[in-house]
Image: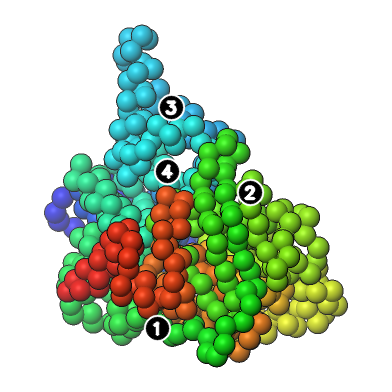
Amino acid sequence: MSGPTAVAEIDELTVEVGGRRIVDGVSLRVLPGRVTALVGASGSGKTTTGRALLGDFPPGARVSGRVRVEEALVGYVPQHPAAVLNPARRVGALLHDIARGQVRELPRSERRTAARERVLKALETAQLPEGTALLRRFPHQLSGGQQQRVVLAQALLLGARVVVADEPTTGQDVLTKRRVVEELAAVAARGIGVVLLSHDLETVRALADEVLVMRDGRVVESGPTEQVWLAPSHPWTQQLLAEQPVLAEFAPAGPRPEAVLRVRGLRARHRAGDEVLRVPELTVRPDECLAVLGRSGSGKTTLARCMAGLHRTYEGEVLLDGVALQRSLRDRGRTRLAAVQYVFQDARASFDEHRPILDQVARTAVRLRGMPVAAARAEASRTLDGLGLPGELTRRTPDRLSGGELQRAALARALLARPRVLVCDEITSGLDTVTRRGILGLLAGLLRDRDDLCLVLITHDLDTARLAARIAVLDAGEVVEQGPAQDILTAPTHPFTASLVRSATRAAARP
């Protein structure tokens, strides 16, 4: 090969787990100052290939081929950053430990100030300008997007020459996505090689110099990004680029029934006492979809967790059928536990890694509906199969499923409870366009088929929010606007909503 010297290289990599090739003969070069993107559906082998640069392979994997990292520190920004942040240590402590190692050559009297300056600079560069306030928080007190940027700050502090960014725009609104693109472009401009693993085709096109399209562990097409976009040669690439979000209407017809779920006078805070959310009134009615739309850190997930009994430090009420729900799910009886089900954005962390998926999904019906084990397993198998997870996959443990497959399993587990309210927290944000379309179509079908079910979609994405009957917009912990989806998306009245709509419109119009 000719051209610039690669800072990292993969040559004919093959990874086999349990007799199945999850990566099959993949080669790539990471060049300084360049962005190489791996795109493909869930389970295509993107993450396994990217993590190979860190020497990290699935347990029991048989590996052949060559992975060369030329004396380069490799930083990794995972799709679910909470997994790599110590939950017992404040953000400031995590980052200062790294920064102190970078200033040892300075006089002792100058080290503390220099380390703090490096930490704040790294946070600002990673799109966290409010770094001083964040330093006092624990990782669980940050949004998913903030956690992701803290991990990026760690990589920058360590002096990484290669950064592997695994779905860095997952769970981000359009404004934050733009800043993430700008930041990763700035990282590359400093001579760092960036490997972008993403299903977000808009981000890939805006950022990547070269793209490799993967399917079933193989690279089916590669080349300069614009060349692949404008003239894709492989049928799978053509399908991937052609897929668009489902534009179904979740608006119920007929008279408006009484609310199933109502939030009233909610003021939520973190344990440290910081108030992070204020919701005077919010309602969800039967067979209705409510989208809660906002940027990373706006309070969306905190609201969802209050509804589900996962965040109990709040004032006000969350009512089901007019009766206040206990703040902690531990205090809710079986019927009320089943009635409000929560599907996590980080599906992998919500499963027991040692038990087969089928057993864990069936357990919901046994525990919350009192079903016999055999009947619960049969219903779980049917539900999983309907979500695209056939029998062979359901007998696997979570570590042998892709992120998209685990999201479908998490949705099946919630459905086994026969919930009245289904709260979905960014469940499509980590999925490729093809899988995302299938999940959204499934949710639309659920609402059409069940007149006793309502759906709360927590999302940063306007295309997803467009599927709802009503939208509530959150900014900095406040509900700044709510109403019919058509009104919010075509004639927003609040400046923040208007900025989101403008940014999404510009992105959609980009050739």
Q: Disc 2 marks which residue? A: 315
Q: Secondary structure at mark 1?
A: loop
Q: Amino acid at mark 2?
A: Glu
Q: Earlier in the sequence, mark 4 or mark 1?
A: 4
Q: How is the image coloured?
A: rainbow
Which of disc 3 and disc 2 is earlier in sequence?
Answer: 3
Local secondary structure at mark 2: strand
Q: Nearer the viewer, mark 4 or mark 1?
A: 1
Residue tagged by mark 4?
151
Question: Mark 2 or mark 4, which is nearer to you?
Answer: 2
Q: Residue at x 73, y 69 (%)?
A: 338
Is 476 left or right of 126, judged from the image as shown?
A: right
Q: Amino acid at mark 4?
A: Val
* Dot 1 amino acid type: Leu
Q: Name the residue beneath numbered marker 1.
A: 247
Q: Nearer the viewer, residue 166 or 18?
A: 166
Q: Earlier in the sequence, mark 3 or mark 1?
A: 3
Which residue in the structure is indicated by mark 3? 96
Image-based side of 56 in relation to 88, left or right: left
Between 274 and 354, the residue placed more toward the observer is: 274
- CB under 8 Å between discs 2 and 4: no
